[in-house]
Image (cartoon, rainbow, N blue to C red):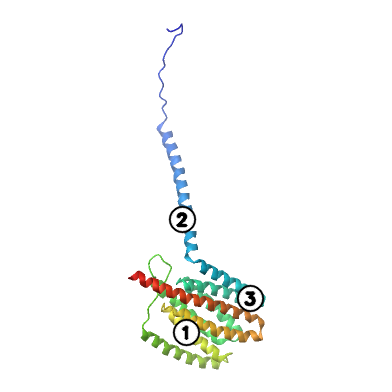
Amino acid sequence: MRNGFNTKVTEPQNIEIPAVYLTSWLQRHADRLVDKTRRFEYYDMERDGLKKTSAYFSAFEAGLWLASVTVIIASFFAFGGGSFLVLTASIIGASLLILNANGNVIGQVLTVVFSILYGIISYSSAYYGEMVTYLGMTAPIAAMSVVTWLKNPSEQGRNEVKVNRLRGREFVFLGFLSAAVTVIFYFILNFFGTAQLILSTLSIFTSFVASYLTMRRCEYFAAAYAANDAVLIALWSIASAGSREYFSMVICFIVFLVNDIYGFYSWAQMKKRQGAEEV
């Protein structure tokens, strides 16, 4: 007894929590933590994927593609391009060229699609040489190029084909083969009464050379396609004199010419870089 009050010290009592409740609480919060971690990792993966996609194309390449598509669409509506098949083929063509410039096999897949559409357009203009070239030659060789490009990547994890180094004797062989193919097709096109026979025959020669070099993964394929673009600019300029709507095709192949010139430069840089990596 102190100061008239009865003091009694009570010891603290231990509160026991059933083990089953404690385990449930820990499990519930652990699950929440794991879920938040997964969401954070998914966000990082998604963000990294966007970075990789944007980093795949250089600023110049993105600008070149955007400018190409803009010019194609503007010329189509400005000159009354007619069928939207022409517009679709042109946009696909601009897209495949920027992919081909990077050695991406998807560009060859789109080449097959473009060849089919362009063959239909050429048939409607009585350019049977172009139709035969793209449906009977460019499309099948592009399909074979898909296989050869997939079998020869520059390295694991990179969407880029390995640039091939052709020997001089293969270029000689290509010269004789291209000449033979051109002569054969000249008589075929003449039999069907192809419009602008000489230019159509020259287009076959340049297209065959370009397609062969593409399949063989040689950087000179872009130079051959640039030569083909020049022929097609002349061919469609003649057609546009009789029908204004074909002028959009002239603009289209001018755009293709610029892209193929860049493609040749890009492949020359790829060849140099890959050679340095092998050393």
Residue 208 image label:
1
State the SS at label 3. helix
Q: Is residue 223 above or below residue 98?
A: below
Q: What is the number of callouts on the image?
A: 3
For label 2, the residue is 45
Residue at (44% x, 46% y) in the render: 34
Classify 10 Å Cα crowding around label 1: few (below 14), some (14-19), many (20 and above).
many
Residue 75 image label:
3
Front residue of this view, candidates 195 and 15: 195
Query: Residue type at mark 2?
Result: Met
State the SS at label 2. helix
Residue at (46% x, 43% y) in the render: 32
Foreground tag (2 vs 3) = 3
Q: Is residue 247 above or below residue 28?
A: below
Q: CA distance from mark 1 to mark 2?
A: 43 Å
Query: Residue type at mark 3?
Result: Ser
Front residue of this view, candidates 142 and 192: 142
Front residue of this view, candidates 264 and 128: 264
Q: Quadrant of residue 155?
A: bottom left
Q: Measuring from the top left, give residue 63's x and y in whole percent.
A: 55, 68
Q: Quadrant of residue 250?
A: bottom right
